[in-house]
């Protein structure tokens, strides 16, 4: 259990730092679209799709590697709470169109990224 917690802690720290850097770099590019948050959530969805796809194939990844990369890295890298806060901000400021576009594009693109990741894992 201690090793598992350490793996999640290390992966989560790396993912959170990378998320912070990407969000800071890209969130200010569009007035009503949080590009950095969108990017980390979609990239994280793709990564977790690949990891879980590879894991399902057999012994390509150990349980420790899957834990480090999924619960750890992807858990720290992606961010539902920031996603929810940004949606709330758009609603509070009356930006219903931007709210709808961001919400729908995030969810649909995230699901497609998972599917793409699972498909890519089959190629390995």
Image (spheres, grey):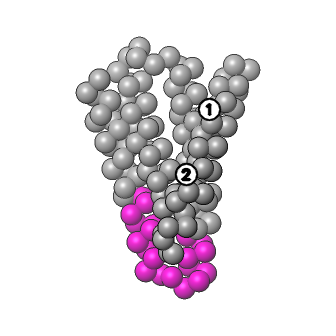
Task: Please identify, in this view, whether the residue under mark 1 or under mark 2 is nearer the observer.
Answer: 2
Label 1: state its secondary structure: helix
Q: Which mark is residue 11?
A: 1
Residue under circle 2? Answer: 22
**Residue 1 visible to an observer of this rendering:** no
The x and y percentages for residue 84 are 58, 63
- Asked whether 68 falls inside the magenta stretch, the response is no
Residue 118, quarter of picture: top left
**Residue 24 visible to an observer of this rendering:** yes
Q: Is residue 86 left or right of residue 57?
A: right
- Total labels: the figure holds 2
The x and y percentages for residue 48 are 45, 37
Few, some or many C-alpha atoms within 10 Å of disc 2 (few <14, some 14-19, many ≥20)?
some
Q: Nearer the viewer, residue 109 or 58?
A: 109
Q: Which residues are magenta?
A: 87-107
Q: Is residue 77 left or right of residue 117?
A: right
Q: Which mark is residue 115?
A: none
Few, some or many C-alpha atoms within 10 Å of disc 1 (few <14, some 14-19, many ≥20)?
many
Quadrant of image for the C terminus: top left
Label 2: state its secondary structure: helix
**Residue located farthest toward the left when viewing the structure as drawn:** 123
Quadrant of image for the N terminus: top right
The x and y percentages for residue 55 are 42, 24
Q: Is residue 118 left or right of residue 37?
A: left
């Amino acid at each position: 259990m201690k090793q598992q917690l350490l793996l999640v802690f290390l992966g989560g720290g790396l993912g959170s730092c990378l998320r912070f850097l990407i969000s800071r770099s890209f969130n200010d590019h569009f007035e009503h679209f949080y590009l950095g948050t969108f990017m980390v959530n979609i990239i994280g969805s793709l990564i977790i799709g690949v990891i879980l796809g590879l894991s399902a194939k057999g012994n390509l990844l150990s349980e420790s590697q899957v834990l480090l990369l999924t619960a750890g890295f992807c858990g720290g890298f992606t961010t539902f709470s920031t996603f929810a806060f940004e949606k709330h901000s758009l609603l509070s400021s009356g930006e219903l169109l931007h709210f709808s576009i961001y919400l729908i594009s995030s969810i649909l693109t995230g699901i497609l990224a998972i599917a793409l990741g699972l498909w890519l894992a089959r190629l390995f």
